[in-house]
Amino acid sequence: MFKGTRNGITGPMDGYTDWAADFQCDRTIPRFKNDVLSVRGSYIRENSSLLATFAAGGAAQTAHHLNTAQANVEHHFGTKLSGTAGLFDITGTRDSLLFSQAAVPRTKSLREDDRTLGTGGPHTLTIFPHPEREQHPAPA
């Protein structure tokens, strides 16, 4: 594809098209002292036509795509604690020129700031303590 204006630059261009969908559902559970259950998810698709990058030798092919999908479930246990479990997946076009072929190291860590256990895979488990909040009288 060649683009240009009357007196402007002409030549191949890279083009991108994205679309996405997401959802969230929150339910109060009266049987469990009004705990709240939340379910969330999203899907994103990106398509690219890299004509300029290909012409410059920066890509092995012109057509690429990227898909990401994630979902999680969160349970709020009253006002003191909540737990979350989730999944994440990413797939797409392989291109030895456009993307690095170096191995990405898998890590295991426990971050003290949010108590998230990361295992380097497509899943998470998070527990958030909720400190007691002091009740203050309304100003007069």
Image (tube, rainbow, N blue to C red):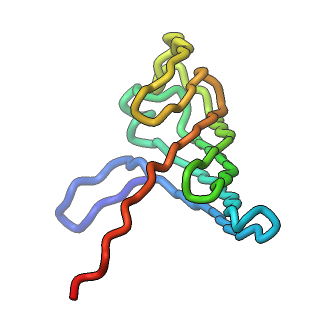
Q: In this view, does 51 lie above or below 96?
A: below
The answer to whether 91 is drawn above or below residue 9 in the figure is above
In front: 77, or 125?
77
What residue is drawn where x is 21% and y is 88%?
A: 140
Residue at the outermost bottom position? 140
Q: Confirm whether residue 84 shows in the render.
A: yes
Seen from the viewer's position, the closer of residues 3 and 18 is: 18
Residue occupying the point 33% across, 48% down: 11
Figure quadrant of residue 57: top left
The location of residue 108, given as percent across then percent down, is 55, 15
Residue 84's x, y, as percent?
64, 44
Front-most of residues 95 and 22? 22
Q: In this view, does 72 lie above or below 28?
A: above
Give the farthest residue toward the right.
31
Rendering coords of residue 19 (x, y %): 58, 61
| Relative side of 87 to 132, left or right | right
The residue closer to the viewer here, 91 or 138, is 138
Residue located at (45% from left, 26% from top): 111
At 67% across and 42% down in the image, what residue appears? 86
Q: Can residue 92 be seen in this view?
A: no
How many marks the image carries: the answer is 0
Residue 90 rendering spot, x and y as whole percentages: 63, 37
Q: Is residue 15 left or right of residue 85?
A: left
